[in-house]
Image: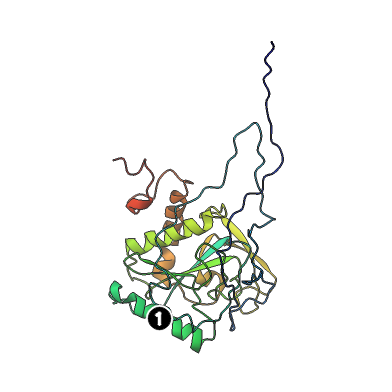
Amino acid sequence: MRLYRIALWVTAPVAVPLMAAPPGATTARAVGDTTPEGPLAVWRADTVPKSSVDSALPFPALGARSVAFPRAAPRPAIVSRAQWRADETKRDAHAHYSQRVTAVFIHHTDTPNGYDCADVPRTLRNLYTGQTRDRGWGDLGYNFLVDKCGTIYEGRAGGTDRPVVGSHTLGFNQGTTGIAAIGTFGRGTPVTAAMEQSIAALAAWKLGLNGIDPTSKVRLTSTNDKSRYTKGSSTEFDAISGHRDGFATNCPGDALFARLPTIRKIAAGLLGRSARAPSGVALPAGLQSPQQTSH
C-alpha cells in the first residue's frame, strides 16, 4: 500500500470582511457648510449591506508563504453617547459614511481649560447643542473628543468603529476622523500626558483598522474651495495631521500642534511599527506590549 503526500495551495485572493454594519443601524447626513460636496457612500437602515468591505482594498493571497495581515491596535475604552447623555432627538436622523479612514485630524474645542473631568459630559452636551442647532451641522462635528484626564468620548453618531463622515475639517471630512482635545491649547499651554496618550491610542486604533502607518503620508482630495486647497486638488498630509493643515485656522493650538510628532510615534508604537515609544513617554498600562510591561 502506497502513501501519497498531498500539498494544497490556495492562490486565489480571499475577501475578508473588514467590518459589518450594526443590526438596525441608521445612517445619516451631515448638514451645514462643512458637509463635503463630493459623492458620499450613504448606507440607509433599509439598505445596509451585510458587509461593508471596500472592494478596492488589497487582500492578501494565501499560498506557500505566510500572510502578513495589517497591524492592529487595541480599541481603547470609549464613553458612549448614551453614557454622556446625548439627546438623540436633536441630531439629524441619518449619517454619512466614507469607504474607510485613512487620516486623522486633531482639533481643540477652544473651551476653558480649568474644567473638572467629572463635568465633561455637561461640556459635551453644550458643544452638541451649539454645533447641531447653532451651526447647523446635524450633530457634533468631531468624531471623538478627549479630556485632560485621558477619557475618550464618542462624538458624532454612527458607530465608533465605522468610517463616519464628520464636520470637522472643511474640505477633508471624507475618509478622515476628527479627534478634538477638550480645552484651548495656545502656545505654552501644557498638554497632559494622559490626553496625549489617549489621542495616540485612538488614532492608532482607527488607522490600524485600515493598515495605515501613523507616521506615514497619505493623499487626500479637497471637496471644498474654502479649505486650504481648491476643490478637486490632491494633497499629501501626515496620517495624523492638525486642523490647520487642511484649513486656515490656528486649531489645534500651537501647544497641541507641537505635540503631534510625539503622538504619531506613540501611535506607531501601539501598532508595532516601532520598537518602543519615544524616550520618556510611558504608554497606558493597558496598551503596552508584553515586552514593554515585563520590567
In the rendered image, residue 265, in percent from the top left (x then y), is placed at 44, 53
Q: Residue 66, relative to residue 80: is it above or below?
A: above
In the image, 268: left or right of 102?
left
Residue 244 screen position, x and y as percent? 51, 72
Q: Quadrant of the C terminus?
A: top left
Q: Is residue 282 visible?
A: no
Dot 1 falls on a residue whose secondary structure is helix
Q: Quadrant of residue 98?
A: bottom right
Classify 10 Å Cα crowding around label 1: few (below 14), some (14-19), many (20 and above): some
Is residue 39 visible to us here? yes
Residue occupying image coordinates x 51% and y 71%:
243
Q: Residue 125: percent from the left, percent from the top?
A: 40, 81
* Place of residue 269 in the rendered image (x, y in percent of width and height, measured from the top left): 44, 49
Residue at the front extreme of this rendering: 1
Q: Is residue 70 above or below residue 166?
A: above
Name the residue located 32 percent from the left edge and 44 percent from the top edge.
Answer: 293
- Asked which colour scheme the image uses, the reply is rainbow
Q: Dot 1 corresponds to which residue?
A: 125
Position of residue 106 in the picture relative to residue 119 (left or right): right
On screen, 13 above or below 170?
Answer: above
Seen from the viewer's position, the closer of residues 278 and 171 is 171
Q: Going by the image, does 130 lie left or right of 37?
A: left
